[in-house]
Amino acid sequence: MYEPSMISPRLTAVLPLIVLVCSAVVLSLAPILVRLTETGPAAAGLWRFVFALPLLVLLTHRPGGEGVGRPSRWMALAGLFFFLDLSFWHYGIVMTSVANATVLCNLTPVVVTLFAWVVLKQRPRAVFLLALAFAMVGAFAMAAGADGGQGTNPLLGDLLSLSVALWYAGYFLAVKAARSAAGAVRVMLWSTAIPIPLMLAACLVLGESIIPATLAGWAACVGLGVMHVAGQGGVAWALGRVSAAMTAVVILIQPVAAALLGWLIFGETMTAIQMGGGAMVLCAVLLAQWSARGRPPAALERQTGAESLDAAPVLSANPGPSGRKD
């Protein structure tokens, strides 16, 4: 029989990776649900935030939760970056080809790793750089192997999609900074609430259709909110325990999961190139995880900024006591 002391450290080490993979799969539902909302692109993002907010408020008031509190500057910055991310991506994918939008958005790991290397002096290992290369090539293969025509304005769409890599990288880094002093649920609460008036203003300025026409459209909007809490909340929780660069690479599993869901739900078959790209992304995730093994605890602690986090993951059905952190 195994002693708890033998099992706990192993589970603690692998749990962030498990949460990240599950979060990536949940977040891969986003394009499917957006397609079913019967609203404009920015309006879909608005409803995602609106329906997620009550769930996050409930989580902050659960037994052991830290409450709503006040937003820090990092939480506000995360909310701003998230607003820019969803707004630009939803329109970029309409204006350019699906392949271009996907490839350009997946440049986020490059931005995160370069920022951590140049600004934070977190020099990546050679194996991690190899994993990053595998991930980028795999993501490109998945996008390039898909069938898709050009949109209404390819050049503008490419520029909007390229900017998403920057906005999402900023979101990753802002959430990581916010998690050094607050729990995942509080960070998610404020980074979700702050973009709501901004997204509403964008919808009104752009003249979008905001109200879904049918109950099915409303159901998709509610689904976006639930997906937001489970998926993005899991990412926020994991960012308190692993490096931002590692998280960005693992999140590249999203296009793999999205392709599989598209095949299962809409009958969209994957080409041989897409399958090969998906395999490369999965190999990159394994390489990135392997590159982090054997790192001294002190170095890992400095990298994550999470010395004594006792948070329960957002995906947990029965979160335990958490003290000052969710």
Image (cartoon, rainbow, N blue to C red):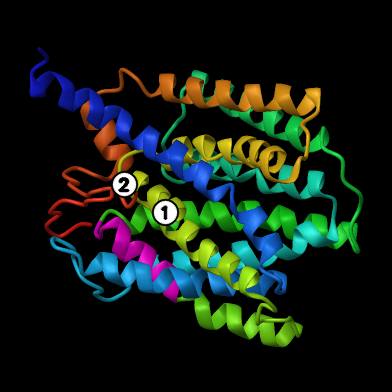
Estimate the x, y position of residue 96 in percent, counting from the top left: 85, 55
Query: Residue 129 appears at what percent x and percent y?
Result: 55, 25
Which is nearer the N-term, disc 1 or disc 2? 1
Q: Quadrant of residue 189?
A: bottom left
The residue drawn where x is 27% and y is 76% is: 70
The reply to whether residue 173 is visible in this rendering is no
Check contact, mark 1 vs mark 2: CB within 8 A: no
Residue under pointer 2:
240
Which span of residues is magenta-colored?
A: 181-193
Which residue is situated farthest in the front direction here? Answer: 215
Is residue 290 in the magenta section? no
Q: Which residue is mark 1?
A: 230
Mark 1 is surrounded, within 10 Å at the Cα level, by few (under 14), some (14 to 19) or many (20 or more) other residues, namely many
The kind of residue on which mark 2 rests is Gly
Q: Whole-percent x and y of residue 243? A: 39, 39
* In-front residue for pair 69/155: 69
